[in-house]
Amino acid sequence: MGGGGGGDTGADGTGTDAHADGTGTGTDADADAGAGAGAGGSGDDGSGSGSTEADTRAAGKPLRDGTGPGGGGRPAVSAARRRGPVVAALMLGMALAALDGTVVSTAVPQIVGDLGGFSVFSWLFSGYLLAVTVTLPVYGKLCDTFGRKPVLVAGIVLFLAGSLLCAAAWSMASLIAFRVVQGLGGGALQGTIQTIAADLYPLEERPRIVARLSTVWAVSSVAGPAVGGLLAAYADWRWIFLINLPVGGVALWLIARHLVEPARERGPRPRVDWPGALAVFVTGTLLLTALVQGGVAWPWISAPSFGLLGASAVCAAVTVVVERRAAEPVIPGWVWRRRTIASVNVAMGALGLLMVAPTVFLPTYAQSVLGLGPIAAGFVLSAMTLSWPVTAAYANRVYNRIGFRDTALTGMGAALLVLLAFPLLPYPGEAWQPALIMLLLGAALGFFQLPLLVGVQSTVPWAERGTATASVLFCRQVGQSVGAALFGALANAVLAARMGGAGDLDAVSHALADGSAHDPLRRAVAAAVDVVFAGAAAAAALALLALLFAPRRFAVLAERQPDV
């Protein structure tokens, strides 16, 4: 953790009033810190001068990255106690964003009973997911243009406004619309929080904060259905959204009070690429709507599916043209031209793809094949959240020795073996068997996601960190949407083949609800989930292949040493 006040020099990229030339994102003691210039750039990507992980270690220095609006630069002083309130706010914000992705699921019967609209209730989830995903790259660019604090504050305010409106909804249509408003704020929370965390902590300490945020995300996501069910059963479903207000209010106050960014150099007024933002939003909305609703609201082979996919392809082409002409594009070309970031983008998309197997299909497997109740089935999945943060917290010890890429390759290689082991489980088996699989999978993925996120953030200067972070998270979100569509269609095909055309996931859900699931159906579900996990293993292989195209050593930004 960063050292205390006075004239000491910290290593976490934050500044306090002890230095007038500090750089990075600071806390309440940083009000007088200015923006310092520095050297930086990721050498393999052609974006400036930099040093590889091996070069940094050879010089006898810990892996650190440049921070500050100047695009690299000397770290300024920081005290862990000064960061505490900001970190608390980041965790609260992350909990809100994760919780609201799943909290509605168990309250659907009460919501539908009150508002109606059963035929469209799935948009309560899809609308939120769409809004979060398509706004991630926009918020990333705004972070780099206007600073982290105003974007995060605006995101929290928008999220809380959406929560209040959801609680006051008078129909299913209005609730869906207000969930979209929530998602517009949630997109700012996801990307900006990770970016601020990278600003606050140096490279050698960053795994700690990323592991904490990962833990908060995992626990909140798993706890969401339980919290929603309890509030809907013992209070009212509207409290699912009202409970966000005090929690979000505390996070907003902590950010407003304690997070102070350095003064930015005066220059031309920032230009916002609003046409590009609109093009990205429309393209993402069309594509994700096709993926999320295909096979649910309409068949895959149908006019709506072809129309949405075709329209998204046309809009994607328009987006490329608009972004190439923009002075400050929302999605700049360098996020795909730089080999490091492009490889990580594809690898993280593959991670989103494979994560659909445990998060979406394992609960159904646990209930239909193992005969567990909903709560016990949730505990089988939650085993993954126990090991993931632990290995993530120790990932820095590994990548300091072998590098970011090789650490991620090791983690995903282990994940591939674990995923291939799932179809080998006996039928019907015991609950501890898939729980052990999830425990091992979480441990493996802890060595995959964190090194890649930290590695990408370390190869870009402060002025590009928000965009780079959002690019990685956006690809992961898109991968999840693609995985839900692809694996859902795959599972339905297996069920239909096993059940003579009479089975699909909806039929399984209804059979589980009324207790009529028989042995042939259970065996069909086991076969379908086995195929899905085999598909997840293929996604893991894709991630490994993508990382082979990344440089073996990421070019870590050079950090100017303090003049003392």
Image (cartoon, rainbow, N blue to C red):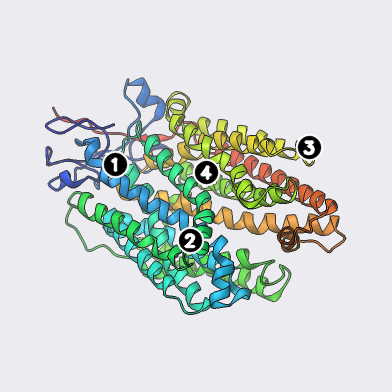
Q: Which residue is mark 4?
A: 343
Q: Quadrant of the C terminus?
A: top left
- Determine contact: label 4, label 3, CB under 8 Å: no
Whole-Å distance between the Cαs marked 4 and 3?
Answer: 37 Å
Q: Which residue is mark 3?
A: 426
Residue 111, horizontal then vertical, whole percent: 54, 71
Question: Label 4 neighbourhood size at 10 Å, few (<14), some (14-19), many (20+)?
Answer: many
Is residue 29 visible to us here?
Answer: yes
Residue 397, horizontal then vertical, whole percent: 43, 25
For the point 46% across and 55% down, which residue is it?
A: 99
- Determine contact: label 1, label 3, CB under 8 Å: no
Amino acid of disc 3: Pro
* Secondary element at tag 2: helix
Q: Earlier in the sequence, mark 2 or mark 3?
A: 2
Amino acid of disc 1: Leu
* Mark identifier at residue 231: 2
Comparing labels 4 and 2, the label whose residue is closer to the camera: 2
- Determine contact: label 1, label 4, CB under 8 Å: no
For the point 66% across and 35% down, which residue is it?
A: 418
Whole-Å distance between the Cαs marked 1 and 3?
Answer: 47 Å
Is residue 138 visible to us here?
Answer: no
Q: Which residue is mark 1?
A: 200
- In the image, taking residue 404 as reference, residue 8 lies left or right, namely left
Whole-Å distance between the Cαs marked 2 and 1?
Answer: 36 Å
Comparing labels 2 and 1, the label whose residue is closer to the camera: 2
